[in-house]
Amino acid sequence: MSMQGHLFGVVPFPAGGVIARAGGDFASELRTIEILEKEWRAHFAARMKQDATLTRQIVSFQANKEEPCYRWFKYKEGFSAQLAHRFLKPGAGPVLDPFAGSGTTLFAASELGLPATGIELLPIGQRIIAARLLIEREFSENDISILNEWISHKSWEKATCRLALPTLRITRGAYPEENLAALERFRACAASEAPNVRSILGFALLCVLELISYTRKDGQYLRWDHRSGRRHGEQTFNKGDIQSFAAAIVRKLREIIDDWTILHHGGLLEHARKNAPITVLAGSCLDELPKLPSGTFGTVVTSPPYCNRYDYTRTYALELAMLGVDEKALCQLRQTMLSCTVENRPKDLQAANPAWKKAVAAADDQDLLQHILQYLEKQKKAGLLNNQGIPRMVRGYFYEMACVLQELRRVVTTNATVVFVNDNVRYSGAVIPVDLILCAMAEDLGLSVQEILVLPTAKGNSSQQMGAHGREPLRKCAYVWKG
């Protein structure tokens, strides 16, 4: 979509800041980007409002940290059940989350009696959802008593056999030897249990891997504690206490048992077993959305990957390795997921689905996006980007998101509610208003923009960006669209 009558020379700019420092053609490019951003902000001004109830805790995993069942696995990229409940209404038809993650939307919908379908590519997300469904809907008192025996007897500590932990190149040497030995003895002992118990013991392992390792999840990658001895690791980074395996696994098993007991004694477990069904489609939403029937879903609540270079195949490498993802499969996952890392290769979208011609055209016609892409390409040619893959990633992100938006418009019912949570980003001094671009493309593809709810606290950009281009807070929003 193009805005007509750009107000060049009318919009005032500060004398200092990004534009003054950019110089030459780059200053002109940045000025054009800022003018277009202001025009699009004016276009949506009546629908854009700050919402004091949307805190960073609510739109992230933080508010789930103390919630029974949601707290078991720290899925940092997820949002809270509180946020999902805000937008889910009883009777609002089947629910869809095309980026299901750990299943927050799915379980919140199911609790309200709404059948829920999720699409999730990463095996770790699929495993979290499956484990919770197993515990809530199939786990018996006898199963719980066996978990209690594991806590009281700690039989793995006396075991002599070990079941080797699968590794990837990026996970080798991740654990202190005593933790690795205990983990592998635990795996060997768990292999002899009945399927339900064995499954939950394995899930509990997934939940503690980071705690007992030399690593910490940190956005784009795993940070390595200097004690790991990895030569390419950070020599000064100290993650603090590395928990012993026994302490970590016992604490996690108790947490699971406690939450099951709360559900059981409160009568919630029986209710959970009558909750609406949850269906998980394993794969990319670009592959799975086109298979869904048109006009099916009354609500979509989701948070797609952000255009922020975060590579979930690296941050969740410990968990993926334990789930048996090998090097080849890891590379395939990285290329299959929505383009959000500098390593994503371009996808031939129209060859994949000729029906996406309309989505590609919507991205082609988005004037602000095209100016941003031109600016980034010029920065690349001038050797000014810290990674040459950034323009390709940004282009892939928005073109693929346009295809997702086209599919969502097709699969939702008339007047359905579609909610997206996302961050704006900044590269090489150019603020990329993800909220405005996605909303503009959504309009072109038949979704009506109802509200753009802005968090009261803006997100700061990276220290590298601030050093080179000055500080500029970035919006984080929840967009509410109608089908």
Image (cartoon, rainbow, N blue to C red):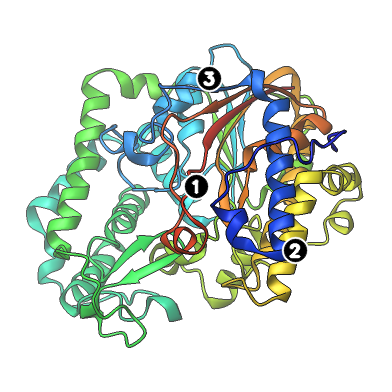
Q: Is residue 264 above or below residue 369?
A: above
Q: Is residue 118 above or below residue 382?
A: above
Could you say whether the residue bearing mark 2 is in a helix, strand or loop? helix
Nearest the viewer among 154 and 252 is 252
Earlier in the chain: of badge 2 and badge 1, it is 2
Earlier in the chain: of badge 3 and badge 2, it is 2
* Residue at 45 percent of width and 35 percent of height: 104
What separation in Å lies between label 1 and label 3 (alpha carbons)?
A: 33 Å
Left/right placement of residue 311 relative to residue 66 reads right
Nearest the viewer among 247 and 308 is 308
Looking at the rendered structure, the kind of residue marked 3 is Leu
Q: Are marks 3 and 2 in contact (CB under 8 Å)?
A: no
Q: Nearer the viewer, mark 1 or mark 3?
A: 1
Left/right placement of residue 321 relative to residue 155 reads right
Could you say whether the residue bearing mark 3 is in a helix, strand or loop? loop
Which residue is labeled 3 in the image? 88
Image coordinates of residue 308 in percent, x first then y, are: 55, 55
Residue most toward the top? 91
* Numbered mark located on residue 43 in the image: none
